[in-house]
Image (cartoon, helix red, strand yellow):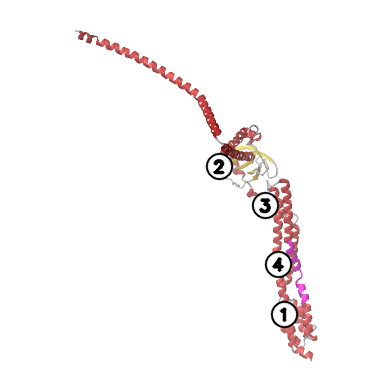
Amino acid sequence: MFAMTIWKHLPIFLTLSLSATGQELVSIEKDFKKARQELASQREKIASEKPALAKAFDITRAELVEKRRTVRIARMSVSDRKALFGELEKKHYLSAQDYSFVEGKLRDYGLTWETFLLPGEEASYESTLSGLRNLDGTRFEQMKKRLAGLEAGMGRLEKLLGGSVVQGEAVAPDGVVKKGTFALAGPAAWFIAEDDSLAGSIVREKGSRMPQVLPGERGEIQTIIAGGESIVSIDVTGGKALALAALEKDKLDIFRKGGFWIWPILTIALISAVCGMVKFTQIFRIRTPGSGWVTEILEALSAGDQERAETVASKAYHPAADVVGRCLGFVKTGPDVVEEVLYEQLIGVQNKLQSWLPFIAVTAATAPLLGLLGTVSGMIRTFNVITVAGTGDAKPLAGGISEALVTTLFGLVVAIPALIIHALLSRRCQGIAQTTEKLGLTLVNGLRGSRFTHSHSE
């Protein structure tokens, strides 16, 4: 009976139990949400307090490290302290050196970057340029300004790699300032004037803020500035190759560089050339008589035909003709007298052959001395410029160095050919004199053995 009562009321009990479990789940869910909110709140609180705690922890740790270091130093001996202090001083010195090196490099970069900015680009970097020009404040603040200049330079470089166009001014070859547009691509730049009167590549002269234009390729530059594609030439030397080409075309520039002393050298070169031409013409006309010339004269003398002998002697275009002609006038006095006359005439022949050659020898010796004098003058001029302007820029020194080198060059150019010409002409004149002496002695020996001499002596 009791069991039947339980089974009868069991469904009601289960319903009540399930109802109680649902209420507990709702309560648990509310508690869980509340706990999650509290956890999120605690996390936010911890996150907000964490930086301060971390900072305090770092400070405490740094203080602890410093105190430990102080304790360690206090426990050290005097010698150990001095050694540690020396190491710290060395590290400080090396750090200062590194800082100064980096600071110097950044300063140089800032100056170079500012120099390469075109007039139209300065407005875009006004704040950075102002910071580089006014380096006030602590060294840390100065370093920040220089690093800002480095960042600006890197940004400009990235911009140039893709190509850019800016407005600005440039100087034409005649010195007139033109307004126009710059097309930039890496280190190369081109310019076209607003009035389309000037177009060309850009070169930067050292010490000049305004870029200069080398005219050329107008159509290609217009296409590039308009946003199109075109092929243009790039001078990777920054205009130096074109400048060298212009100097090579100017043939008179080397004479201007030689200064005053180039003109005396050119004068003696002219004198040497005239003397050489005159002497060469004189020697070129001389023809050595044939082997039968003296024999024919001796045969005429043996036949007693003095007039014919003189006629044969005069036909030769050689100094021996005059010498033999003079000797024929003394044939009747005997061979010894003829020989004396021969040697007397040979002295005159040698003097005549040596004429003009001393002038060539003097020019050959004087030209390098004048070149050396110009070298000394140019070096003195160079040292005077160094005294005033220093050695930072080699361009002001070019005048004195050019004078020193060009005068030496011209002195050697004049002296070497003059020496060669003098040696060749002297050798040729010596050969002519020896030939004249040989022919004269042949005549004397022939007279000594001829019948004409025997008959005359009898």
Looking at marks 3 and 2 on the same chain, the residue that comes earlier in the sequence is marked by 2
CA separation in Å, label 3 and label 2: 33 Å
Could you say whether the residue bearing mark 4 is in a helix, strand or loop? helix
Q: Where is residue 179 in the image (x, y as percent from the top left)?
A: 66, 38
Q: Mark 4 points at which residue?
A: 421
Q: Mark 3 points at which residue?
A: 247
Q: Which SS type dominates the magenta stretch? A: helix
Q: Name the residue under label 1.
A: 438
Crowd tier of the residue under label 2, counting other residues whose Cα lies within 10 Å: few below 14, some 14–19, many 20 or above: few
User: For the point 70% across and 52% down, which residue is it?
Assistant: 401
Q: Nearer the viewer, mark 1 or mark 2?
A: 1
Q: Residue furthest bottom?
A: 458
Residue 284 in sight in this render: no
CA separation in Å, label 4 and label 3: 32 Å
Looking at marks 4 and 2 on the same chain, the residue that comes earlier in the sequence is marked by 2
Q: Nearer the viewer, mark 4 or mark 2?
A: 4
Crowd tier of the residue under label 3, counting other residues whose Cα lies within 10 Å: few below 14, some 14–19, many 20 or above: few
Q: Mark 2 points at which residue?
A: 229
Looking at marks 4 and 3 on the same chain, the residue that comes earlier in the sequence is marked by 3
Residue type (three-letter) at the residue carrying disc 1 = Lys
